[in-house]
């Protein structure tokens, strides 16, 4: 979720500051651009409304709905990119290669689109089978034209806001052609995809769709996911020449690509979630953004904690927790809350990289904060078959422990360094904010509806309607114009997730087709030698590595396909196994060297990205023991008796506090290396959640406390106190 001063999508963020010194466009160009932007906005609104209607009023056949979801996302992605970019006036000449690529692209894409139109017209006229010539000549020109348009976008990167880029428009039209073909033959493809009877035209439509998905993912999410997807695609063809467990018989292009564009691949679990729950809650977040509820969350956090020691850092923790309930992306959380908290942290004495690191670590927790959990709960429910409400319920204690661990790190650091809070005169007044407590109503309605047993889609819709109604009690009433804006922003915010989920579907499809997931699970069993702990440590590293540079949604989907079966075969409960993998996929956002949340924070603070990522990792280090806690005691996931859940929660809080003190080197005064080691041992003994180990940990902590009281001077203890 973004603030009103921030770009509404990754596409806008990429281009918002480009060529700000360019000369103004002529009046006719400005008028054209205004109309073009209106067309894009209307298309975004139509995309959002289509999803809301299908989910709530007019159900559509599953394949057709998912295909339109993917195709519409591709069309909008390339059109929005086109609406924002073009060549600079300084390079307005048509170079030979430039012109050649555009001509090839235009010829191929338009010819392929014409063939698809002919196929559709033939179908509308009641013909049983489309014309052979249309099927024969449809695919290759479309594929070649699409590749030419993609290469044109790579080679000629001169851009200027306010113009249109022909190559991107052609990619949007290619998306229409490829997806329209697959939609037309959806019923037949469900039978012949991945089989010898698949037609060459089926393959070319699927190949073109894959190229378009990969290109849009590159533009919106970076190269990391594209490279991983490319490796998996190459693996599908190179299997016969690979050694050991990697070897497989290999697949021809027709079987592979037609298989990938089914519900075993691109149209599988990630897109199933993206086309329902993700887009629903993204639009809900857009409604809350438009009605300024997100700003209210941040203001409440400032009023409650801004005056405490290290106040702005604690505000970051509270605000990120509140924002995480509705917005589950790490980078989105950083932008939404960090634009306010990072400058305030710098104001009270935090270094820029520390301010960015605190915000990144706090914002990362938004993805494990119920009820939305960055779409992780929805994908987990789809993969495991565990009811969504059970997953949300299980996430409550780990989320609380995560945010407490960040809070302890921040508080101890502020105490150690003598940091103060902000003057109350500079903070919002809590009594005035409490008079607007009705702004929490959409969240309350969402949570109540979930626990009342309504479907997730109905709950999200009710919360969305509540946000619109509540806005009429504020100066930001949601009339037709604001409603249009919210629907448009919702579509723009969803585009990256559509591309990412489709790309993740490619990887999941390769895993399903080649069987590498089951073989990898067998290898995991062998390496772990029947040790659940070793298997989980291995799973932790794989989840973190996969998450580096990949959005959490994609990282979890891939890791769950590869690792989870092996862990479950070792006897680990499915909920615990999947939660473990998801938790560490989330933590990858602050794990160097590629820590996306830390990079977003460093951009706001002006700090070094790598130093920021290492400090964010340090701040979040205490949270790394939480998954091992719920592995040893599933009561932390609300499994079992209430008394057990209370017990493990208390010991978990004590454990993360001791670990935070060990990391910061401060425990009721400065801690020497021996004290820090003792605190670390005490914290680790509390991981298991047993009465004996907890007693040992408490005993060590008590001994250290009394030694600190005797060895540390009162002046040192008082250092940094309020």
Image (spheres, grey):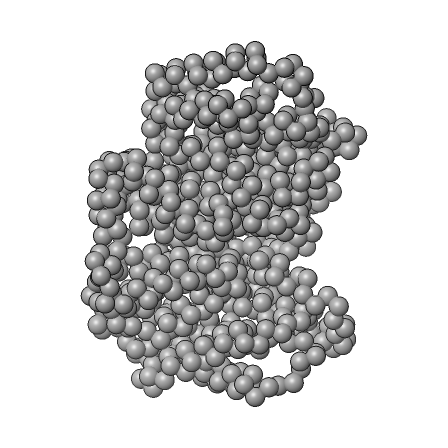
Q: Quadrant of residue 579?
A: top left
Q: Residue at x 66, y 52 (%)?
A: 6
Residue 227 visible somewhere in the drawing: yes
Residue 276 visible somewhere in the drawing: no
Q: Residue at x 42, y 24 (%)?
A: 681
Quadrant housing the C terminus: top right
Q: Depth check: 593 or 70 in front?
A: 593
From the top left corner, tell me how far across and down residue 340 is, in percent. 68, 42
Q: Is residue 74 left or right of residue 239?
A: right
Q: Is residue 206 left or right of residue 400?
A: left
From the top left corner, tell me how far across and down residue 350 is, in percent. 67, 37
Q: Is residue 608 left or right of residue 461?
A: right
Q: Depth check: 309 or 271 in front?
A: 309
Q: Is residue 708 left or right of residue 586?
A: right
Give the answer, above or below, for where 314 lies relative to 584.
above
Q: Residue furthest right?
A: 425
Q: Depth check: 679 or 651 in front?
A: 679
From the top left corner, tell me how far across and down residue 260 is, in percent. 32, 64
From the top left corner, tell me how far across and down residue 112 is, in percent. 43, 80
Give the answer, above or below, for where 517 lies relative to 129.
above
* Number of marks in picture: 0
Q: Residue at x 38, y 81 (%)?
A: 140
Q: Residue furthest bottom?
A: 96
Q: Residue at x 39, y 36 (%)?
A: 391
């Amino acid at each position: 979720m973004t603030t009103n001063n921030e770009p509404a999508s990754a596409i806008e963020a990429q281009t918002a500051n480009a060529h700000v010194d360019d000369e103004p466009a002529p009046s006719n160009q400005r008028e054209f651009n205004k109309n073009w932007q209106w067309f894009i906005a209307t298309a975004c609104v139509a995309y959002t409304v289509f999803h809301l209607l299908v989910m709530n009023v007019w159900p559509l056949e599953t394949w057709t709905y998912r295909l339109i979801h993917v195709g519409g996302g591709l069309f909008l992605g390339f059109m929005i990119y086109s609406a924002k970019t073009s060549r600079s006036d300084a390079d307005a000449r048509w170079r030979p290669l430039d012109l050649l690529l555009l001509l090839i692209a235009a010829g191929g894409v338009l010819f392929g689109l014409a063939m698809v139109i002919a196929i559709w017209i033939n179908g509308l006229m009641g013909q049983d089978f489309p014309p052979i010539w249309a099927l024969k000549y449809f695919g290759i020109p479309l594929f070649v034209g699409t590749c030419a348009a993609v290469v044109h976008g790579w080679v000629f990167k001169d851009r200027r806001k306010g113009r249109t880029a022909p190559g991107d428009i052609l990619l949007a039209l290619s998306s229409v052609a490829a997806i329209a073909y697959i939609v037309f033959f959806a019923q037949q493809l469900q039978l012949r995809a991945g089989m010898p009877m698949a037609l060459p035209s089926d393959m070319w439509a699927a190949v073109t769709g894959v190229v378009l998905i990969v290109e849009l993912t590159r533009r919106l999410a970076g190269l990391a996911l594209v490279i991983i997807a490319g490796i998996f695609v190459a693996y599908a063809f190179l299997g016969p020449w690979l050694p050991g467990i990697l070897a497989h018989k290999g697949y021809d292009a027709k079987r592979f690509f037609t298989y990938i564009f089914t519900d075993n691949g691109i149209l599988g679990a990630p897109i199933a979630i993206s086309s329902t729950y993700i887009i629903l809650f993204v639009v809900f977040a857009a409604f809350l953004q438009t009605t300024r509820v997100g700003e209210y969350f941040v203001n409440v956090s400032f009023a409650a904690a801004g005056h405490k020691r290290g106040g702005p850092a604690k505000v970051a923790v509270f605000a990120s927790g509140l924002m995480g309930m509705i917005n589950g992306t790490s980078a989105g959380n950083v932008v939404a809350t960090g634009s306010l908290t990072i400058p305030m942290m710098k104001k009270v004495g935090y270094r820029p990289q520390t301010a960015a690191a605190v915000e990144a670590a706090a914002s990362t927790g938004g993805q494990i904060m119920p009820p939305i959990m960055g779409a992780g709960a929805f994908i987990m429910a789809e993969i495991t078959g565990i009811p969504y409400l059970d997953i949300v319920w299980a996430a409550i204690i780990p989320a609380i422990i995560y945010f407490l661990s960040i809070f302890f790190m921040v508080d101890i650091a502020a105490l150690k360094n003598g940091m103060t809070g902000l003057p109350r005169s500079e903070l919002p007044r809590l009594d005035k904010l409490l008079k607007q407590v009705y702004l929490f109503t959409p969240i309350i309605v969402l949570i109540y509806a979930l626990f009342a047993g309504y479907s997730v889609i109905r709950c999200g819709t009710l919360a969305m309607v509540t946000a619109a109604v509540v806005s009429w009690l504020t100066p930001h009433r949601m009339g037709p114009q604001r409603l249009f804006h919210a629907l448009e922003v919702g579509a723009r915010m969803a585009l990256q997730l559509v591309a990412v989920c489709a790309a993740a579907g490619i990887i999941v499809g390769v895993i399903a087709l080649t069987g590498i997931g089951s073989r990898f699970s067998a290898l995991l069993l062998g390496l772990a030698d029947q040790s659940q702990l070793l298997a989980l440590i291995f799973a932790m590293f794989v989840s973190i590595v996969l998450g580096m540079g990949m959005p959490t949604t994609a990282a979890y989907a891939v890791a769950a396909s590869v690792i989870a079966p092996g862990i479950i075969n070792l006897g680990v409960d499915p909920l615990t196994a999947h939660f473990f993998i998801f938790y560490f996929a989330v933590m990858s956002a602050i794990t160097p060297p590629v820590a996306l949340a830390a990079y977003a924070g460093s951009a706001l603070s002006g700090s070094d990205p790598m130093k920021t990522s290492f400090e964010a990792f340090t701040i979040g280090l205490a949270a790394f023991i939480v998954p091992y806690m719920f592995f040893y005691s599933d009561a932390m996931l609300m499994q079992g008796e209430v008394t057990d859940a209370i017990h493990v929660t208390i010991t978990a809080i004590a454990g993360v506090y001791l670990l935070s003190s060990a990391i910061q080197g401060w425990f009721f005064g400065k801690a020497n290396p021996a004290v820090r080691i003792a605190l670390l041992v005490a914290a680790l003994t509390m991981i298991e959640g047993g009465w004996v180990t907890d007693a040992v940990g408490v005993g060590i902590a008590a001994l250290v406390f009394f030694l600190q009281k005797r060895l540390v001077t009162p002046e040192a203890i008082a250092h940094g106190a309020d």
